[in-house]
Amino acid sequence: MTELADLAPQMLAKERTQGTFDVEKCVDLVLGSKQWQQRMNELRALIMVDPILKDRDFMYRNHKERYEYALAKSHAFVQFLKKHNINSHEERQFVYYQLGEPLPIDVHRSMFIPTLETQMDEEQRAYWLPLALDFKILGAYAQTELGHGSNVQGIETTAVYDVATEEFIINSPTLTSRKWWPGGLGKTANHAVVHARLTLSGKDRGVQAFLVPLRDTKTHQPLPGIFIGDIGPKIGFQSVDNGYCAFDHVRIPRRNMLMRFAKVLPNGDFVKPPTDKLVYFTMVRVRVFVSYICYRYMAFVVTIATRFSAARLQGFAHKTKNEQAVLNYENQQLTLFPLIGLSYAGMFTARRLQVIYEAMVNDLGAMDAQKLDTLNQLHATSSGLKAFLTTEVGNGMERARRACGGHGFSASSNIPHLLQEFIGACTYEGTFDVLVQQHGVSLLKRLRKPVPSQVGAIDLFGFLQVDASRSCAATSAQMLLEPEILLHAFQVRALKTLQQAARLGKSMHCVSRASMGHAESVILQCFYDGVLEINEKPLQAVMLQLWQLYALWRMNEHLGEFRMHDFLSAEQASWVEESMLGLLAKIRPNAISLVDGFGITDFELNSAIGRYDGDIYRALIERAAKEPLNKTDVVEGYHKYLQPILASKL
Amino acid sequence: MTELADLAPQMLAKERTQGTFDVEKCVDLVLGSKQWQQRMNELRALIMVDPILKDRDFMYRNHKERYEYALAKSHAFVQFLKKHNINSHEERQFVYYQLGEPLPIDVHRSMFIPTLETQMDEEQRAYWLPLALDFKILGAYAQTELGHGSNVQGIETTAVYDVATEEFIINSPTLTSRKWWPGGLGKTANHAVVHARLTLSGKDRGVQAFLVPLRDTKTHQPLPGIFIGDIGPKIGFQSVDNGYCAFDHVRIPRRNMLMRFAKVLPNGDFVKPPTDKLVYFTMVRVRVFVSYICYRYMAFVVTIATRFSAARLQGFAHKTKNEQAVLNYENQQLTLFPLIGLSYAGMFTARRLQVIYEAMVNDLGAMDAQKLDTLNQLHATSSGLKAFLTTEVGNGMERARRACGGHGFSASSNIPHLLQEFIGACTYEGTFDVLVQQHGVSLLKRLRKPVPSQVGAIDLFGFLQVDASRSCAATSAQMLLEPEILLHAFQVRALKTLQQAARLGKSMHCVSRASMGHAESVILQCFYDGVLEINEKPLQAVMLQLWQLYALWRMNEHLGEFRMHDFLSAEQASWVEESMLGLLAKIRPNAISLVDGFGITDFELNSAIGRYDGDIYRALIERAAKEPLNKTDVVEGYHKYLQPILASKL
């Protein structure tokens, strides 16, 4: 009889003979051109031999150790970029995301530099941007305060203009006004973009952004009046020095205010920004990025869990002597297959958002009414999408983890690390409740004051025009698989929940539900449009099944909402489950191909149980051998602590 | 204007003037007699001044450091018990759970000793138990293997009896047969209860338990033929050395088999156990304990989140200039209040299970048909309850964490620690899918072959007798709050999902749903019975509201199932939400009293944002000051890693 340890790789190999589409075509769909794939492989190969950058031992380190090692990685990363002459944003981004953990320069890259780019005027950019891009200054993005998170209007830090010296005085007037949370602020950054409430001649001019030097660029000592430190351990980002900072009447030059839009003249006059909607662009940009993060993390975890489930035996099938692969169980399929769907749904949605966003940014010239309308739709919808995707992916990752049993609890699977690094996304950049409220309230306004759809315009709010009086047209379980029926059902559900929110004017819960209803409808449409664009017929056929499963799974999760006013009858509702379960068997042969199709390498996955080759048991044993406690047979504490207990000498 | 930092404690104090019941009466309900409360306070006060036992700095430590510190804590714990002459199980248990983290002797206490007690014969107990109770030996419980978790029948470790020497030969024949996961096995235990498949004269005699010495009791070195170590970091239990162990033909005396039930005679003859159901007792015992764990952890986290939400301001109410406490938002209430309900529901359910279990254990003498039937019901139901409670509490803790925004992500809130220590419960002692399957299949058997309810018997399966053809009788939203209507709805839903599972014979998903339907119905009944028994009228009235909210929340979560065959009409379904939202406002004034009513001290909570006095902002700042990275203004790595980057010297 074959040993389990040898059987596991054989089982996974066998799975790969059962797929009905060419996995390489799917990888092309996900990762892009062959040329870019080859370049990624070259860069990855270089990283995999770099003694510092290839490190993946973070699981053995506490926060302080992780931060310290991440400093070494930051150093090696910058060196690597220079040595290999890597200058494009795309390639730098790729290299960075191969490192397996965020670095103390994370926010410098992802928030500080983009903020200088988008909020500084030309002269300011010319001076500061090269310094930042070349890492001659390291920046933080200091908005959140101890007393206020998502609510920017609550910010207490003040900036008062002193006409005499042409300086701003940045101050933390209360205990809760200290900046709290910004990544890199605690120990790394020597500058920060600081958000503060501006006062000009005693008049409140709203929250503005200022570039504040924090530390001496030679000695790295905090500058006078600046009190700064690390806020301590967290669930994730342990390699980053999320920090706090208090300002005691710190003076900065007038030109350190970011002046692309709002401006303060030397005499203290205030120049208003042309529109207050411009800040939406930054928010949308971040949300597009978060959508990508959602798709990637979900894809990573579901790849690990699906491969493990195909290689792992547990329990006996009804009346047979053969142990079953865990993936043969209906519950396991119903846990994992929709999450494969969620990954692809996230990918197509992120891409659609990016296309809309880029089209807008590249055509900023004249903000006419139609463009402003699109910006509004995009801003509102991306709020809801961020809330939906981070919540569902966070929950989905945890469900997939539990589906791996004990091995999902062990750091060797890498799922704990992925989950811990991801889960902050559920609260950073706007908590769920704040975002769905923004989105839902915006939808409510449109419901009361509809804007007719315009030809050529981006029509994210199209569901408002759907006929909600028509109940579901499906007359059989089979008909429930038809795209038109499914898309219509999601639009009607979005509209009905919105109408309900309008009726019960004060219910935040109903508004939230309307937001989620709309977000789901948009995602389903993006996913479907993505499937339609696939040229490879066998791949497209499987993706369509995955789309159907995803749709029915979401419907089943919120069946009560779809049955509102009996839009679905009791009989139709019973078909949802029937059709959903029926699809599992259809997708089963392609499960491994669908996760292989994400094109994630073993180096990236870093998972003993998610390996491509299925050799999971040897990998687990190798990992355990690396545990520092195993360096000696008898632990140091034995003589001092255990021996007296055992000898009853206490 | 009052500073936010000062406002927070005032807000929480004001909350406490609004409750309608006497919090002390609730604490009595939860914690028990005044005498026992006083004793707990005495013991806790002693712990709080013990330099080792009071430590709560685990957040700064990696796995190796946490294990090493936990050894020191184990030593101090045993010393503490002896010094203060603490011998009762109840008091020892209390002291242990005040330590804030599990110790390497966790499984010695919770599994090893109870197994010796229940599975050794009298002579064996007389020899081994005193050694274990006095910590002269330290034991592990080695069942799970690398290749097999929940499925005991898959165990590969072998025990072959050698008649010549009257010894068993314990062996790990394959790579996947090594023991994997047992707590304390890696570095601490010098003995283990090892489960292995017994072969007598070539005949398979099933999986049996053996006491195997692992390490030299003097030197602590592993004994010959034993390969042992720690499996590495995990999400939780980082202070425990979960270990692996392989046996190379290790010989142990015949009398090291645990022989209370099955026995092997010197000549190799096998004596079968009287019934194979006896193992159910151990499983039920563990599940009762897990139910308590669920209730306690949920209560801890919801206490933190509710107090934080009452003391935290965010955003402005509609058309006012006053910032709102987060707890005033409907979404926050709908997140937290049902979780307060879940905590109490878990408490009452755990108590009920314990009563049933103890009644059975104390009357083991004659296992007649009725007792066996009760044992079967209890075993099956407790499987479903474990699956339901661990899943819902795990999810609920995470939802409550997210409801605290960024502060819930920070270790200072202590929610990350609580979540990480708890979440293993979702997979250990049986994963969700294995348990619901056991439960659901057992229910299906009863549906096909019903056993009439017996007077005096415990009737967990009573829902099988309900009339499922009757649709819901509520004719108004108000009527939906009536206990009889709600309890009936949950029973009908359980029965309908079970009948559906019977129709779709092969669907594991439908079986799982029936299991959850029944578990929910049992919990709702236990919670209701608990409310009925409360003598204090004002407390009872509030608890009844909480019960109603809990019931409607569960109904709303699975509205599709409650609408099966239109048991609830579309109109009735709309009342579920309406009534649920209506209850939030009723419960709001008592929210803080309800969490204060759990009687959890600040020392136990260990949370900067969950403090009783609401002084959360100063507490957060104090915590941050303790972060080791803050010992110096400029980190060690600056000169080596940061300075060269900043000076562009790379």
Image (cartoon, coloured by chain):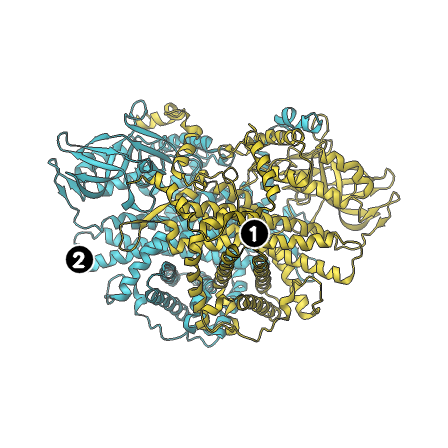
Chain colours: A cyan, B yellow
At numbered mark 1, what does the secondary structure look like: helix, strand or loop?
A: helix
Report the residue marked by disc 1.
B390
Report the residue marked by disc 2.
A368
- Residue B141, percent across and down? 69, 41
Q: Is residue A622 visible?
A: no
Q: Amino acid at mark 2?
A: Asp
**Quadrant showing the N terminus of chain B:** top left
**Position above or below: A68 against B535:** above
Q: Which residue is drawn at the image coordinates 25% and 54% (left, top)?
A: A359
At numbered mark 2, what does the secondary structure look like: helix, strand or loop?
A: loop
Q: Nearer the viewer, residue B312 or A485?
A: B312
Res B39 → quadrant: top right
The furthest residue to the right: B267
In the picture provided, is A438 more to the left or to the right than B253?
A: left
**Quadrant showing the C terminus of chain B:** top left
Q: Amino acid at mark 1?
A: Thr
Q: Chain of mark 1?
A: B
**Position above or below: B490 against A469:** above
Q: Nearer the viewer, residue A239 or B615?
A: B615
- Residue B297, percent across and down? 54, 46
What is the crowding at mark 1: few (fewer than 14 residues within 10 Å), some, or many (at least 20)? many
**Position above or below: B570 against A410:** below
Q: Which residue is drawn at the image coordinates 34% and 53% (left, top)?
A: A435
Q: Chain of mark 2?
A: A
In the picture provided, is B403 more to the left or to the right than A328?
A: left
